[in-house]
Image: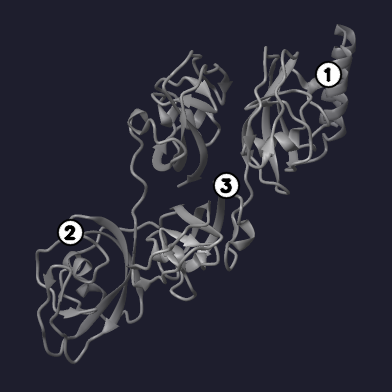
């Protein structure tokens, strides 16, 4: 009854104060979906919604008409624009937040994500996307052949790291390679650990090299039709490694994860299987999983004592032989640590057009940013992430940014409580293409 009373008062107020046909259309649309807990479906046009921020449920498609790029005419098809802008994949259903803006003097044509928008001159109203609520990452398929041809597209999958399956290549893999194994080989995911990975679809290569990394040897191959590259993954929490693993003796077959910085100092006994009083940082180098002074997250398996431990010279480190000992361990995998902290600006990356970089950021409302969706490369990334709707202030996340050429102008918009500054021509730019909180 309370909701009905409030709505009645709103209606009376609108009637008493006068209501335009445009306001009436918006009101009828909102009342129609008031009882629904989800966002209403996308309307055919946003013309009646001029001057407001709205949320709609869309299903990405590629067949509608649209004019503009980043900023679209408000009679552009919302579900097609959502795909063109990169916020939604074709046939993906999600909730998008759009800001309806004043008309622009012109709308440029661009080709993005398999869609070419149409250019147009002056129009009375516009809109741009602020954010999209992404569904949980889908489970990684056996291979990525079905994504062949979607070059430069970014996809997110959930995988369980594996040492089984086939992979061809190194860093860049054939698209029939198993992602669950490729992510272990590339150093992004540990064996048997569940992670969310981000992959970039690439064209076929003339050749694929074989390398041995993280306990896995990939296979070489000649020319192939399609490829992919793993560009980021969620990182599990990992405490600093102890000097040795004696405290874990007897916990046979337990898998432990530690953060370690490789060292060539200290004593180690054995090869592949080490005595549990062996210096862990040195064993990580001897085993080939970590370089000296390199920091990684490593996984170890606790083993029973052995009757003997062999001496070998591996990776510039010589281990010592020993007889029977009470406890042992072996290193089974290593991954890259969390992405580096974002620099004050991305000016040093200017010119690396099209390259994607991963950084750790903490959302803030401080600092300077110029532009909207596409920012000048001296804009503060931490603040741009909040402005773009990817994270909230104070929240830590791993973000992916794409380096872009300089633009002729950068508009000012107010998004998520932050007002960016407008600017004219600038030498370099970037856009934020994704974020994983945590």
The quadrant of the image that shows the N terminus is: top right
Q: Position of residue 26 (x, y in %)?
A: 83, 23
- Residue 345 in view (yes/no): no
Q: Residue at x 37, y 72 (%)?
A: 216
Q: Nearer the viewer, mark 2 or mark 3?
A: 3
Q: Nearer the viewer, mark 3 or mark 1?
A: 3
Give the label on residue 78, or none.
Answer: none
Q: Residue at x 85, y 13 (%)?
A: 13
Counting residues from the N terminus, which is met first, the one under dot 2 or under dot 3?
A: 3
Q: Secondary structure at mark 1?
A: helix
Q: Which residue is mark 3?
A: 153
Q: Is residue 425 left or right of residue 30?
A: left
Counting residues from the N terminus, which is met first, the one under dot 1 or under dot 2?
A: 1
Disc 3: CA contacts within 10 A as few (<14), some (14-19) or many (>=20): some
Pointer 1 and pointer 2: residues touching (CB < 8 Å)? no
Q: How are the residues colored?
A: one colour
Q: Nearer the viewer, mark 1 or mark 2?
A: 2
Q: Position of residue 231 (x, y in %)?
A: 45, 51
Q: Is residue 164 left or right of residue 19?
A: left
Q: Position of residue 105 (x, y in %)?
A: 67, 12
- Location of residue 218 with respect to 189 vertically, above or below: below
- Per the model, the C-alpha gap separating discs 2 and 3 is 36 Å
- Location of residue 344 with respect to 242 vertically, above or below: above
Q: Which residue is mark 2?
A: 292
Disc 1: CA contacts within 10 A as few (<14), some (14-19) or many (>=20): few
Q: Position of residue 252 (x, y in %)?
A: 32, 82
Q: Secondary structure at mark 2?
A: loop
Q: Quadrant of residue 331?
A: bottom left
Q: Which residue is mark 1?
A: 10
Number of marks present in the image shown: 3
């Amino acid at each position: 009854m309370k909701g009905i009373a409030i709505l009645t008062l709103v209606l009376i107020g609108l009637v008493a104060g006068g209501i335009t046909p445009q306001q009436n259309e918006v009101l009828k649309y909102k009342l129609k979906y008031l009882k629904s807990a989800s966002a209403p479906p996308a309307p055919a046009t946003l013309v009646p919604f001029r001057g407001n921020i709205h949320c709609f449920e869309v299903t990405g498609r590629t067949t509608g008409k649209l004019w503009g790029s980043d900023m679209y005419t408000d009679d552009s098809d919302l579900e097609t624009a959502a795909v063109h802008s990169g916020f939604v994949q074709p046939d993906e259903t999600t909730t998008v937040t759009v800001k309806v803006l004043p008309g622009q003097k012109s709308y440029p044509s661009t080709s993005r994500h398999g869609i070419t928008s149409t250019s147009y001159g002056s129009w009375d109203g516009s809109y741009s996307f602020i954010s999209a609520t992404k569904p949980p990452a889908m489970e990684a398929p056996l291979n990525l052949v079905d994504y062949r041809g979607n070059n430069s597209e970014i996809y997110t999958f959930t995988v369980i790291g594996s040492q089984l399956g086939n992979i061809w290549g190194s860093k860049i893999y054939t698209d029939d390679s198993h992602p669950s194994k490729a992510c272990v080989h590339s150093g992004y995911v540990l064996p048997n650990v569940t992670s969310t990975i981000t992959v970039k679809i690439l064209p076929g290569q003339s050749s694929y090299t074989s390398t041995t990394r993280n306990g896995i040897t990939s296979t070489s191959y000649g020319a192939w039709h399609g490829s992919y590259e793993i560009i980021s993954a969620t990182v599990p929490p990992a405490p600093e490694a102890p000097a040795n693993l004696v405290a874990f003796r007897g916990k046979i077959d337990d898998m432990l994860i530690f953060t370690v910085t490789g060292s060539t100092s200290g004593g180690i006994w054995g090869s592949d299987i080490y005595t549990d009083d062996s210096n862990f940082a040195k064993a990580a180098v001897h085993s080939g999983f970590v370089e000296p002074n390199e920091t990684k997250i490593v996984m170890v398996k606790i083993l029973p004592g052995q009757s003997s431990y062999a001496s070998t010279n591996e990776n510039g480190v010589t281990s010592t032989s020993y007889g029977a000992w009470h406890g042992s361990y072996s290193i089974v995998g290593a991954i890259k640590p969390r992405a580096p902290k974002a620099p004050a600006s991305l000016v040093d990356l200017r010119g690396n057009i099209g390259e994607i970089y991963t950084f750790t950021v903490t959302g803030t409302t401080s600092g300077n940013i110029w532009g909207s969706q596409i920012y000048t490369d001296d804009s503060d990334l931490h603040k741009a992430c909040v402005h773009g709707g990817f994270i909230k202030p104070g929240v830590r996340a791993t973000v992916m940014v794409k380096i872009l050429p300089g633009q002729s102008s950068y508009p000012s918009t107010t998004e998520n409580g932050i007002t960016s500054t407008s600017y004219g021509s600038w030498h370099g730019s970037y856009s934020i293409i994704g974020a994983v909180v945590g």
